Image (cartoon, coloured by chain):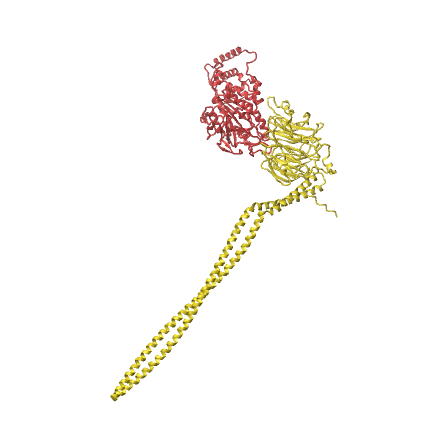
Chain colours: A yellow, B red
């Protein structure tokens, strides 16, 4: 399954602007207009946004999330139940407390009544004793009277006058005494009677109090029973709440990925929304922007950072991503719309050069002589074919416009042509290799010199293959027969440094004009110190048919370093060179004007540059471990001019 | 600073150049007094200890040679390859040398802390950090002064691929000054035109008679030296074929990989075979501040096959056991790859290779960290290496040189030989 939704076949709208923009050459692949790419981006952004929304929606509706919601609701209702039960418990506890104090009060009253009974009993005992004492005194007084009366009677019988009087007196006294004793008895009886009644009263009161205590005790028992019941209910509710909490925890844990997925999907949807907004805005700006792209408007719009310095960069012809080779064995595909990055593994070491043709063919060449074929539109691209192409590095790779051939050039001095479909060797050209023995280039007869092929390119009409080498020779080969057609003199890109006894220079970049009439090559010229890399960034432009060198291009300002890569703008109107020495720069040249008409400083040395097929964007591979995307579309729409008053 | 480190321009040596030691020096190490006493070449071959120093001027990259770190941020684009010693890998730019690793030992923990061509060259060739106002003798002068057999008429210290400086012998005097040789035989090495061998012998006999009469009653060191200079010249002329490299067949140059350096290795082989004591072969232009990888492809492409063939030849001919071979330079190159795809000067963590006499082939001592930015095991400097060279050829590195009654240590104090690689 392809990572991209395949776009509709390229049906460029051949508007007047397009004709003016790319020029139309029969048989030459005409890039669709910029607006077409903006339209495609917009469509893709729309699809991505829709898909992201759908995803976010479905993610938010996952059963795991529903389970969490249900568990949360269950727990909530159980929490309410627990609260209710807790309140109930508190009420019963208050009631029990009240009953307990009531019991205490009745018990106190009962104790008091008991005390009263005791007091009344003591009183009665005392009264009864007093009564018994009084009765005893009366009885003794009655006896004394009887004795006195008997004595009197005796005296009277005896008519003992003297004695009768005395006896009479004694009888009177005894009578008085008896009267008093009888009165005392009556009084005591009265008292006993009163105290007996009083005791009965207190006993009744005590019995009443006892009854009240019993009643209060029973009430407390009932209240306690109610508390126990409420507690049990509360505990039951608590258990339920705990169970619900555990369940919720479990469900939540199970739902964690779903939660994250939902979050991610939401973020993705937000991002897709932003991308869509940006694509919409860009589409509008591209549609409205009628002027041809102007290098002076160039500005950075994106920066992709890698672990190592970036050395090779090419856009996919679909315009969807940029493929970067850095100082490690993996390639990186960077989606321009989504910024998604895919690592592509299969090379043994650094990749020096990338060539793409159509939407599903990438061929890359590495520093150990290997070529790898890829389908850059695959989800996770893997090499579909690997070929050991050269001894030493592969320095140049190109795919013919009809995708039949892959050409490579390398350190062994050979140019080799491979069948793109089978990987079989089709042709081997030793024209550069043979220069190793030409006295003009071999510095001394004693020195072994191997000329290196630095780069190769097919012209867009598919008629020629060109190859450039270390010593500034560019060879043109006829596609099919692979016979040499002519040599182009790029000697400004080569110096033999006598001090260091080394060849320095090389055809580092090659590019054809979109109509195939011009070819530009670049590198370092005017080298004064090979090992320190002291020289001038230089490019040469040739007329392909005549082989005439039309111009030697250099930066307008004094600059030391190399021009590592050169590309024609798809309009064919101007070229960009990328390079640097102590610092990095992009230079913009008209094909036949020797001095650059514009230059832009880059954050560090630039090793490669490529135009997006929309002609508006360019990618630059930099030593500072980045690939930066630059835009030719003016950063903001100029404000409408204020009408003059 | 961008500063080239070579030992000067190669010039044809003249007989006068050869003899400067004997004519101007106060001390002659040559104890022979006439061509009749010149030892037979065969005897010499079997007894003379030899040293060949390969000087990779400018500073070869240790990462592209002896201590590869493929796949790391500093490793560069090249892969490593196995060698004839299991477990020891070198950079893929040395495929021929890889097959001779059983003859070579690698010291991977060199830290000289010197990043300057002049100072690095000095430390590595004298065993001492540079100090102003005093010159220690260079390895070629020092070892030849101790190793040259008294009956060996050949110059002790010969340079190929670049001349040495007269300063190199320091207090050891002109006798051990480096002598540069080139493809063509030195000038004035033949008997003057028009003379036959007998006539020449008669000439010298006449000179000797006159000289003897002059010397009678006034024999002194200076007159002896003067006489010896004639004797040495005569001996040298008798050995002149040693310096005639025109006989090296093209097929041999081809077998050595072709090119100038192959030829220089064959010249070194010829000198070794003839019993020449110390030969320094300079291979220049490793100072790759820009395009390190491209230039190392070319430089090591020149170096690898001739050097490896030289080592294999010496081993095949039974000469390696009498010959110490050292491959070094002023420093290594930075692990960091700069913005010109170059590597800069780096004395902090680099390698030296050596082999042959007294060296345990296949040994590797010392190590750098994963990306080669630091020595992590068995750190050594030029002093340790000097002790090792002395020990390898059977000399005592702790016995001082004595000059004007003053002792001079042979290598930086506090260093000792790297025992792990000594046989």
Task: Name the quadrant containing residue B189.
Answer: top right
Quarter of the picture holding the N terminus of chain A: top right
Could you say which is closer to the camera, residue A133 or residue B420? Answer: A133
Which residue is painted at 74% across and 47% down in the image? Answer: A644
Q: Along the horizontal axis of the image, is B174 left or right of A420?
A: left
> In the depicted view, which residue is nearer to us: A18 or B34?
A18
For residue B417, say whether it is visible. no
Question: Between A394 and A182, which is closer to the camera in this rendering?
Answer: A182
Q: Is residue B49 left or right of residue A572?
A: left
Where is residue A260? Give x, y as percent: 58, 45
Instruction: Please state the horizontal and vertical placement of residue B157, each as a whole percent of the image.
Output: 51, 22
Residue A588 visible, this angle:
yes
Tell me how many marks there are: 0
Q: Position of residue B15 (x, y in %)?
A: 54, 18
Q: Is residue B172 left or right of residue A595?
A: left
Up-down: is A626 above or below B24? below
At horizontal 50% and vertical 61% (from top left) the residue drawn is: A91
Q: What residue sits 49% from the left and 58% below the top?
A: A229
């Amino acid at each position: 399954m392809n990572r991209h939704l395949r776009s509709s076949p390229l049906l460029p709208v051949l508007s007047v602007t397009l004709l003016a923009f790319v020029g139309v050459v029969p048989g030459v692949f005409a890039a669709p207009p910029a607006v077409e790419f903006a339209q495609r981006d917009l469509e893709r952004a729309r699809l991505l946004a829709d898909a992201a929304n759908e995803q976010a929606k479905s993610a938010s509706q996952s059963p795991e999330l529903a389970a969490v919601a249900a568990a949360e609701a269950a727990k909530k209702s159980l929490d309410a139940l627990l609260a209710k039960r807790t309140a109930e418990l508190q009420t019963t506890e208050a009631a029990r407390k009240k009953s307990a104090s009531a019991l205490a009060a009745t018990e106190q009253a009962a104790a008091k009544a008991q005390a009263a009974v005791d007091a009344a009993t003591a009183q009665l005992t005392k009264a009864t004793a007093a009564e018994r004492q009084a009765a005893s005194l009366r009885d003794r007084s009655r006896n004394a009277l009887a004795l006195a009366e008997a004595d009197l009677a005796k005296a009277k019988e005896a008519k003992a006058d003297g004695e009768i009087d005395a006896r009479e007196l004694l009888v009177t006294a005894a009578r008085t005494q008896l009267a008093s004793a009888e009165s005392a008895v009556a009084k005591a009886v009265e008292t006993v009677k009163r105290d007996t009644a009083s005791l009965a009263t207190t006993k009744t009161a005590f019995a009443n109090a006892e009854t009240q205590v019993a009643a209060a005790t029973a009430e407390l028992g009932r209240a306690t029973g109610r508390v126990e019941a409420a507690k049990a209910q509360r505990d039951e509710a608590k258990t339920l709440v705990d169970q619900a909490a555990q369940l919720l925890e479990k469900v939540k844990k199970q739902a964690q990925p779903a939660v994250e997925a939902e979050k991610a999907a939401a973020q993705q949807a937000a991002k897709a929304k932003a991308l869509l907004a940006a694509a919409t805005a860009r589409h509008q700006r591209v549609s409205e922007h009628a002027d041809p792209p102007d290098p002076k408007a160039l500005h950075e719009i994106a920066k992709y950072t890698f672990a190592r310095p970036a050395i090779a960069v090419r856009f996919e012809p679909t315009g969807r991503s940029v493929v970067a080779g850095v100082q490690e064995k993996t390639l990186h595909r960077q989606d321009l719309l989504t910024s998604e990055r895919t690592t592509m593994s299969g090379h043994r070491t650094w990749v020096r050069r990338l060539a793409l043709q159509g939407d599903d063919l990438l061929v890359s060449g590495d520093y150990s002589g290997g070529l790898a074929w890829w389908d850059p539109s695959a989800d996770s691209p893997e090499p579909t074919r690997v070929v050991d192409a050269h001894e030493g590095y592969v320095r140049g790779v190109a795919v013919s416009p009809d995708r039949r051939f892959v050409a490579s050039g390398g350190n062994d001095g050979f140019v080799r042509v491979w069948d793109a479909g089978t990987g079989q060797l089709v042709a081997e050209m030793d024209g550069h290799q043979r220069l190793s023995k030409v006295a003009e280039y071999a510095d001394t007869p004693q020195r072994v010199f191997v000329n290196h092929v630095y780069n190769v390119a097919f012209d867009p009409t598919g008629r020629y293959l060109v190859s450039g080498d270390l010593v500034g020779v560019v060879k043109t080969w006829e596609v099919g027969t692979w016979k040499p057609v002519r040599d182009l003199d790029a000697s400004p890109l080569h110096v033999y440094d006598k001090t260091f006894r080394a060849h320095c220079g090389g055809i580092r970049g090659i590019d054809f004009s979109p109509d195939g009439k011009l070819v530009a090559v670049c590198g370092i010229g005017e080298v004064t110190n090979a090992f320190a890399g002291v020289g001038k960034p230089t490019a040469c432009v040739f007329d392909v048919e005549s082989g005439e060198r039309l111009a030697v291009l250099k930066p307008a300002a004094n600059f030391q370093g190399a021009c590592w890569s050169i590309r024609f703008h798809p309009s064919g109107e101007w070229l960009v060179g990328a390079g640097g020495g102590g610092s990095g720069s992009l230079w913009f040249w008209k094909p036949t004007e020797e001095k650059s008409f514009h230059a832009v400083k880059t954050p560090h040395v630039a090793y490669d540059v490529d135009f997006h097929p929309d002609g508006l964007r360019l990618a630059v591979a930099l030593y500072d471990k980045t690939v930066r995307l630059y835009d030719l579309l003016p950063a903001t729409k100029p404000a409408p001019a204020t009408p003059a008053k | 600073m961008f500063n080239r480190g070579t030992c000067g321009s190669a010039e044809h040596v003249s007989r006068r150049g050869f003899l400067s030691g004997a004519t101007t020096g106060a001390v002659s190490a040559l104890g022979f007094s006439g061509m009749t006493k010149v030892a037979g070449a065969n005897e010499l071959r079997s007894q003379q200890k030899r040293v060949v120093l390969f000087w990779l001027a400018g500073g070869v990259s240790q990462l592209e040679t002896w201590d590869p770190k493929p796949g790391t941020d500093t490793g560069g684009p090249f892969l490593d390859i196995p060698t004839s010693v299991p477990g020891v890998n070198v950079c893929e730019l040395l495929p021929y040398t890889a097959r001779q690793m059983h003859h070579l030992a690698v010291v991977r923990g060199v830290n000289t802390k010197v990043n300057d061509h002049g100072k690095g060259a000095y430390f590595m060739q004298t065993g001492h950090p540079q100090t102003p106002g005093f010159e220690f003798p260079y390895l070629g002068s020092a070892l030849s002064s101790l190793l040259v057999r008294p009956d060996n008429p050949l110059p002790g210290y010969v340079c190929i691929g670049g001349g040495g400086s007269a300063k190199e012998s320091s207090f050891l005097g002109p006798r051990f000054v480096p002598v540069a040789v080139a493809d063509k035989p030195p000038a004035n090495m033949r008997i003057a035109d028009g003379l036959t061998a007998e006539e020449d012998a008669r000439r010298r006999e006449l000179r000797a008679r006159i000289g003897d009469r002059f010397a009678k009653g006034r024999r002194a060191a200076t007159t002896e030296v003067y006489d010896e200079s004639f004797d040495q010249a005569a001996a040298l002329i008798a050995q002149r074929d040693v310096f005639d490299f025109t006989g090296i067949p093209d097929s041999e140059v081809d077998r050595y990989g072709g090119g100038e350096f192959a030829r220089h290795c064959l010249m070194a082989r010829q000198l070794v075979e003839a019993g020449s004591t110390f030969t320094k072969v300079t291979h220049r232009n490793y100072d790759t501040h820009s395009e390190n990888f491209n230039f190392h492809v070319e430089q090591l492409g020149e170096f690898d096959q001739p050097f490896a063939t030289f080592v294999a030849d010496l081993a095949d001919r039974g000469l390696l056991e009498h010959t110490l071979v050292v491959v070094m330079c002023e420093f290594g190159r930075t692990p960091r790859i700069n913005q010109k795809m170059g590597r800069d000067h780096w004395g902090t963590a680099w390698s030296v290779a050596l082999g042959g006499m007294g060296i345990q082939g296949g040994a590797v001592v010392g190590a750098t960290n994963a990306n080669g930015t630091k020595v992590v095991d068995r750190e050594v400097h030029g002093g340790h290496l000097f002790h090792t060279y002395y020990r390898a050829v059977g000399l005592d590195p702790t016995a001082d040189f004595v000059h004007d009654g003053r002792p001079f240590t042979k290598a930086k104090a506090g260093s000792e030989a790297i025992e792990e690689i000594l046989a």
